[in-house]
Image: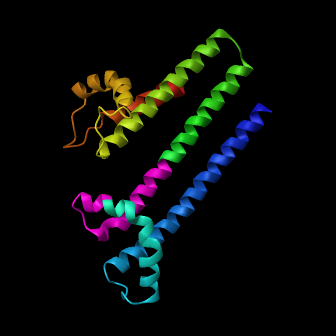
Amino acid sequence: MAMSLLASYTAFVVGMRAVLFYIGVLVAAVCVVDWAVRTRRINAFSRVARFFRGNVEPLMTPIDRAILRGGGMPTSTPWWTIAAYALFGILVITALRFIGGILTTIIFAAADPKPGAIILVLVSWTLSVLQLALLVRVISSWLPVSPGSPWIRWSYTLTEWMLAPLRSVVPRLGMLDITPMIAWLLLSLIQSLL
């Protein structure tokens, strides 16, 4: 029963990944045509251009506003829309994998109710929460969000103890700090060893 539940969930995640991919292909195709309309590569008075200006561009208004506030050009909105959808897809798949990991550990802990198994489950959950905090911290660093924000502060609190020593050992690559990636890989390695 428990293994069939786990197999069903795994099939669901694989199906969601495929659905998100195909929706992403559709979003990319729509964004390419919208870009062509915005840059006047498609006649501004054609049916396609009128359709996109009336139906598609209003859907991109929040991204358009953010780009204009940042001093960007409205013609880059379709490309930022593709990036936003890719980020959304990554977050959904990561959340589904996180939930799947929790389900897996619950099923195996219930099958083997020894005290050592419960400790392994708790350690595994702790590592998963640390990985989630790293992901939130990295994504928030790309956005105009303050690290002191209550929505983000917890991720800095949970991860700074492991990133600070890594920063003293791992050099920066220009402006890129790769210590969160190294910490993620180390946490994944520890989790796989458990």
Q: Position of residue 121 (x, y in %)?
A: 59, 20
**Stretch of the chain drawn in magenta:** 66-90
Up-down relation of residue 12 to residue 34 (above or below): above
Q: Residue at x 45, y 57 (%)?
A: 85
Asked if residue 173 can be seen in this view, the reply is: yes
Asked if residue 189 can be seen in this view, the reply is: no
Q: Position of residue 108 (x, y in %)?
A: 69, 24
Report the predominant secondary structure element of the magenta stretch: helix
Q: Which residue, as the protein is rendered here, is positioned at the far right?
A: 1
Up-down relation of residue 21 to residue 134 (above or below): below
Compare residues 58 and 29 and report the one nearer the observer.
58
Q: Position of residue 5 (x, y in %)?
A: 74, 37
Compare residues 53 and 131 and report the one nearer the observer.
53
The answer to which image quadrant residue 78 occupies is bottom left
In the rendered image, residue 126 lying in the magenta stretch gets the answer no
Describe residue 192's horizontal placement relative to residue 84 as left or right: right
| Image quadrant occupied by the C terminus | top right
| Image quadrant occupied by the N terminus | top right
Render colour scheme: rainbow
Q: Position of residue 21 (x, y in %)?
A: 54, 59
Q: Residue at x 40, y 37 (%)?
A: 136
Q: Residue at x 34, y 29 (%)?
A: 156
Describe residue 69's horizontal placement relative to residue 140 as left or right: left
Describe residue 177's horizontal placement relative to residue 50 as left or right: left
In the rendered image, residue 75 lying in the magenta stretch gets the answer yes
Describe residue 185's horizontal placement relative to residue 166 as left or right: right
Q: Which residue, as the protein is rendered here, is positioned at the far left?
A: 174
Q: Residue at x 41, y 78 (%)?
A: 53
